[in-house]
């Protein structure tokens, strides 16, 4: 399937996905190809192509996405064990879906990569 609008379709429930949380601003759902036992994507409902498109008008969404990520980590009881939040940006950052998202990886000890 074309990656371009795939997250929009998930947000609007036009294609099936495992949505964990949704409100007016963001949607969280399970990654279809998990890289760790818990792999959640946190996505703004408004399409922002990448973190490069954050500006003074929309910057609050990033704080909100992180705040809600922490809330869900606590609710799902993996906050104390720990987790990793990742944002890939464009070609060199390994971004495939052009809709800003945070990866939340948890459920095992992750290898250090930087
Ligand atoms: P990125 O490489 O940062 O753009 O990550 C895109 C992520 O979206 C990858 O981890 C994919 O496994 C995930 N993904 C792609 N399509 C779907 C889908 N239909 N439902 C859930 N996750 C998806």
Image: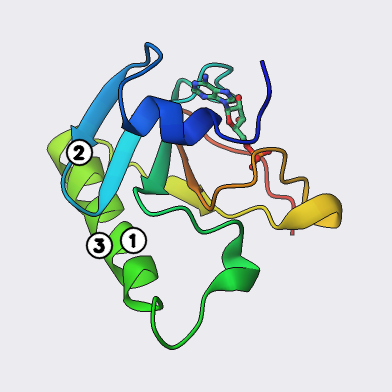
- Give 109 or 6, whichever is nearer the viewer: 6
Quadrant containing the C terminus in the rendered view: bottom right
Query: Would you call the spot at circle 2 few (<14 residues within 10 Å), some (14-19), or many (20 or more)?
Result: some
How many marks on residues?
A: 3
- Does the image show residue 31? yes
Q: Secondary structure at mark 1?
A: helix
- Give 109 or 24, whichever is nearer the viewer: 24
Q: Earlier in the sequence, mark 2 or mark 3?
A: 2
Q: Secondary structure at mark 3?
A: helix
Query: Would you call the spot at circle 1 few (<14 residues within 10 Å), some (14-19), or many (20 or more)?
Result: some
Q: At 34% from the left edge and 68% from the top edge, which residue is drawn?
A: 61
Q: Residue 39: image x %, image y %?
A: 46, 29
> In the rendered image, which residue does mark 3 sit on?
67
- Does the image show residue 80? no
Kindly report the distance in space between the C-alpha atoms of the residues bearing marks 2 and 1. Answer: 14 Å
- State left or right for residue 65 relative to residue 100: left
Above or below, 64 relative to 15? below
Quadrant containing the N terminus in the rendered view: top right
Q: Earlier in the sequence, mark 2 or mark 1?
A: 2
> In the rendered image, which residue does mark 2 sit on?
22
Query: In the rendered structure, are the residues bearing label 1 and label 3 in contact, judged by CB atoms less than 8 Å apart?
Result: yes
- Give 10 or 28, whichever is nearer the viewer: 10
Kindly report the distance in space between the C-alpha atoms of the residues bearing marks 1 and 3. Answer: 4 Å
Query: Would you call the spot at circle 3 few (<14 residues within 10 Å), some (14-19), or many (20 or more)?
Result: few
Q: Which mark is residue 66?
A: 1
């Amino acid at each position: 399937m074309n990656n371009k609008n795939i997250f929009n379709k998930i947000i609007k429930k036009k294609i099936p996905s495992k949505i964990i949380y949704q409100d007016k601003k963001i949607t969280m759902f399970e990654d279809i190809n998990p890289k760790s036992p818990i792999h959640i994507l946190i996505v703004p409902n408004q399409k922002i192509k990448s973190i490069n498109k954050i500006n003074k008008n929309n910057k609050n969404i990033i704080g909100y996405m992180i705040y809600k990520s922490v809330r869900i980590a606590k609710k799902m009881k993996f906050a104390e064990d720990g987790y990793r939040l990742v944002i890939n940006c464009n070609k060199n950052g390994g971004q495939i879906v052009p809709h800003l998202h945070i990866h939340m990886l948890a459920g095992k000890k992750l290898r250090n990569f930087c």
